[in-house]
Every structure is written in C-alpha cells, then in structure tokens.
Amino acid sequence: MAPSEMRYALLAGLAWRLWTGSLGCRLEFPRCAEPVLYVRCGDGHWEPVVAVQCGHAWLLLWRGAEVDAARLDEVARTIAAAA
C-alpha cells in the first residue's frame, strides 16, 4: 500500500472509531499536502492527528505524543478520554 493510501486508511479508521464513540472529528485533504484528522475537544477547539511512517511502522501524532497506529482501538480510547 502506498504511503498516502496507508495514511488515509489509518486516519479514516481512527475517525470511524472516534465517531462511533460520539466524538466529533473531520478528515481534511489539503490541496498540496497529506490528509489530517481533526478531533473536536470538549472546549470546542479542534486538534490535529497526523499519521507518519517511521521505518516499517506507522505512528499517529496527537498533542505531541507518538502512538502505535497498529492499535487504533486503544488510540481512539486514549484520544476520546483526553479530548
């Protein structure tokens, strides 16, 4: 899977988990950049989540933390609890 396709798949998978858990989110596709997932926090502001490739692994970056993208359910629970 191409990096852009993998990035989209990870962020879309995370968005689905967050949305089904009743957390607002939106996936944006900037014209000349990779997709970014924005999560709506309790105070109404939006925080970005990005997916990056690190060697053969993928990480999700949120609020300065790096989390293993292979564990999307756990990542969704962590973000939902903190947002």
Image (tube, rainbow, N blue to C red):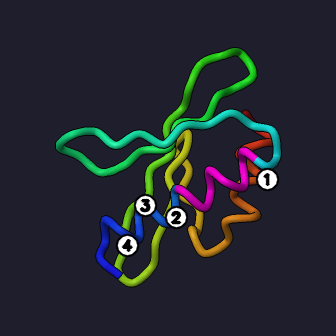
Q: Is residue 53 left or right of residue 39?
A: left
* Distance between the alpha carbons at the discs numbered 1 and 2: 15 Å
Residue placed under numbered mark 3 in the picture: 8
CB of mark 3 within 8 Å of CB of mark 1? no
Of the two numbered discs 2 and 4 on the same chain, state the one appearing first in sequence.
2
Q: Amino acid at mark 4?
A: Cys
CB of mark 1 within 8 Å of CB of mark 2? no
Q: Residue at x 52, y 56 (%)?
A: 11
Label 4 neighbour load within 10 Å: few <14, some 14-19, many 20+: few
Residue 75 falls inside the magenta stretch: no
Q: Nearer the viewer, mark 4 or mark 3?
A: 3
Q: Secondary structure at mark 1?
A: helix
Q: Nearer the viewer, mark 3 or mark 1?
A: 3
Judging depth in this view, the residue of 70 and 18 nearest the camera is: 18
CB of mark 3 within 8 Å of CB of mark 2? yes
Of the two numbered discs 4 and 3 on the same chain, state the one appearing first in sequence.
3
Q: Is residue 29 left or right of residue 67?
A: left
